[in-house]
Amino acid sequence: MRINFIFLILLLAASSWAQDITWSSNRPQNTLIEDCGQGEFILTNEGSTAADLSISLDGNYDDDDLSTDVLPNVTIQPGEAYSFVIEAVKDDQIESDEYVTITITSGNAILHEETLSLEDELFLEASAMQDFSACPGDELVLTASSNGNVTWMPGNVVSDTLLFSFQDNTEMTVTANQGSCMESANFTIESEVNVQINTADTLYLCEEDAPEIVTATLTNTNTVQWASQGFQFAQGAGNTIEINPVSSGWLYATVSAGSCVVTDTVYVQVDSLPEITFDTIPNKDPYCPGEIVTIYGMKLQQDRYPDVTYAWSPETGVISDVKKANLTVTTTDTITFVRTTTNNACISHDSVTLNVDNPPIQLNFTDTLICPNQTVEIELLNPERFESYEWGPEEKVSCTECVKTKATVQESSTITLNLKTEHCPTSASVNINVKPPNPITIQGDGPVCPGEDIQLTAVESEQYESFSWAGSVDFSCTDCPNPTIKSDEINSATLTAVDANGCLGTGNFVYSIHQVPAVSIGIEPLEVAQGETITASLLTDESEEFTDIVWEVNGDITDETTMKANLIMASEENMITVTARTEDGCPVMATITVNATPPSYTIPNAFTPNAQSNNIFRVITKGNITVNRMRIFSRWSQLIYTDESGEGWDGTQNGKKMPSDTYVYMIELTLPDGQKIEETSEVTLIN
């Protein structure tokens, strides 16, 4: 049971794959011709699962007869394809009954099998290889045999057999091809006899026109038989006829040769047009410019004149479709409108004239260019054509109801003239354009340091009579051509100048400055006594190199010229000022006030020479107090030590340590105000 079940599954799978695997090739004749290129074969998996296939080549051929890239086993994924090629290799042997069979299998099931014959060369044989004649209207069966694809021209029909409906002389080509190989044959099918009426399939005539002469082109005959249905004709010279356009019908021309009879047919259509009349709404004479007028033309009945068309001209003022029976226009001037009504061969040109009361308005000018506030005179040159006229706007003209008026404007303006004829109002306008200011070139240096003067020069100043400067800078003068200006920041200076004709000129100059860094003073230490020295530093946030550095204390210039300065705070309140110049030469300045504590002094009452501190007896001063002289006495008033350097006593006499004891000192001091005092007391020496 298991074996049978598995076998059933295999059969079902193979059957399913057979439906999903499609085959195509560029060799539908199942031939491979030597030296004609590769035959391509494509297997496409149109199923939803992968297909494992085996491909084998068998048949009656030698291995040297074929070249191929086919693989014996392939797996084709869903929606994908596998292609391979087989080529018949050219050799000197004549192939006879050689073939190759391509077998596609899946498991034990054969999905597809194709046999291709191997042939030496492409051949073409056709039923007609030479010219022949036929009767127009015949249905011809043309055949060809080939081991390649057969194509017939004209028609580009790919088939061994062509069913050809012959009508007139035709050049035929039959082609056989496979790959790069091609063979062809050309031949002509000629008419045994033929006739063609020299008109279109429908001959359009207009009733009451002159008779129409009709001719025919004859092939292989000199005789034609004319016939008609629905109208009569007259025989003309030779094979021509004359048709008097009275009624419509059919015209026949027939020729024959033996059993071949050919007839050409033309339909003769005779049309007509009625007399065309027009009406206008509103109906008046004359019209005024700008009126909307509709011209109603006869719209012909559609059932009687189904082919009628309309075309209006000219299109001046037209606001409707010019291909309609009626026309709507906006009146401008007197114009004659023409409607061309066409009914096939019948054409009628009908016109209507719209008279418009629109006399020309003649002014001495319609456009002009002036300077601001310049006066121009405008004149109506043909006032006799109008009953009234009025200039405007009133505030810009010297008079309103006059032939001549004057206008003075500061900016470009339009002056209007409203007129009235006997029938219609009309108007005109004059454009007065004010010249834009001429550019003035302003020259000056820059950038400069903030607050530095710049001399300005208006290059074209000789062309102007008056000047006016404006801007957020300080001017040396505001009504001169070449002032000097200065500012602490970037600003603009604008010049407006007026020439002798009142025309303007303008120029602009930007006062640009060097960027100057902010500076300040830092001090160390922060607290100092009067008379002591501090270190002052010139500080800035920029990476700037300064030159010409000057330090002042309370208005007195010091000798310090670097970024850091050692300064004595001689007063209780000390004003420190530093000035310098940047790399661009711009000055910078900073100030700081340093308050010093009042000077003081302290005299110890004991000291120990060998101690880490307080090992020298001396006056401890803060500020500008000077120790002029120190003298040390023993308790018996013997002078032991004298010092005028202020360094103090180290507890020795001539290099010999003095014993621990109490000693008397006398110290002379000079206070900041110059007062001299003397301090006398005792100090204990502890060894």
Image: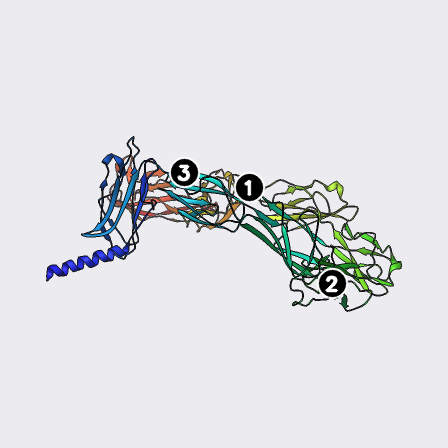
Q: Does the image show residue 574?
A: no
Element type where label 2 sits in the image? strand
Of circles 3 and 1, which is in front?
A: 3
Q: Looking at the image, tell me whether mark 3 or mark 1 is earlier in sequence order.
A: 3
Q: Which residue is mark 1?
A: 586
Q: Amino acid at mark 3?
A: Glu
Q: Residue at image x 27%, y 47%? A: 114
Q: Is residue 481 above or below residue 433?
A: above
Figure quadrant of residue 666 = top left
Q: Looking at the image, tell me whether mark 3 or mark 2 is earlier in sequence order.
A: 3
Residue sticking out furthest to the right: 384
**Residue 183's mark?**
3
The percent position of residue 287, horizontal first and vertical second, equals 80, 65
Q: Is residue 137 above or below residue 130?
A: below
Q: CA distance from mark 3 to mark 1?
A: 98 Å
Element type where label 1 sits in the image? loop
Structural crowding at the residue carrying mark 3, measured as other residues with C-alpha within 10 Å and reported as few (<14), some (14–19) or many (≥20): some
**Residue 330's mark?**
2
Structural crowding at the residue carrying mark 2, measured as other residues with C-alpha within 10 Å and reported as few (<14), some (14–19) or many (≥20): some
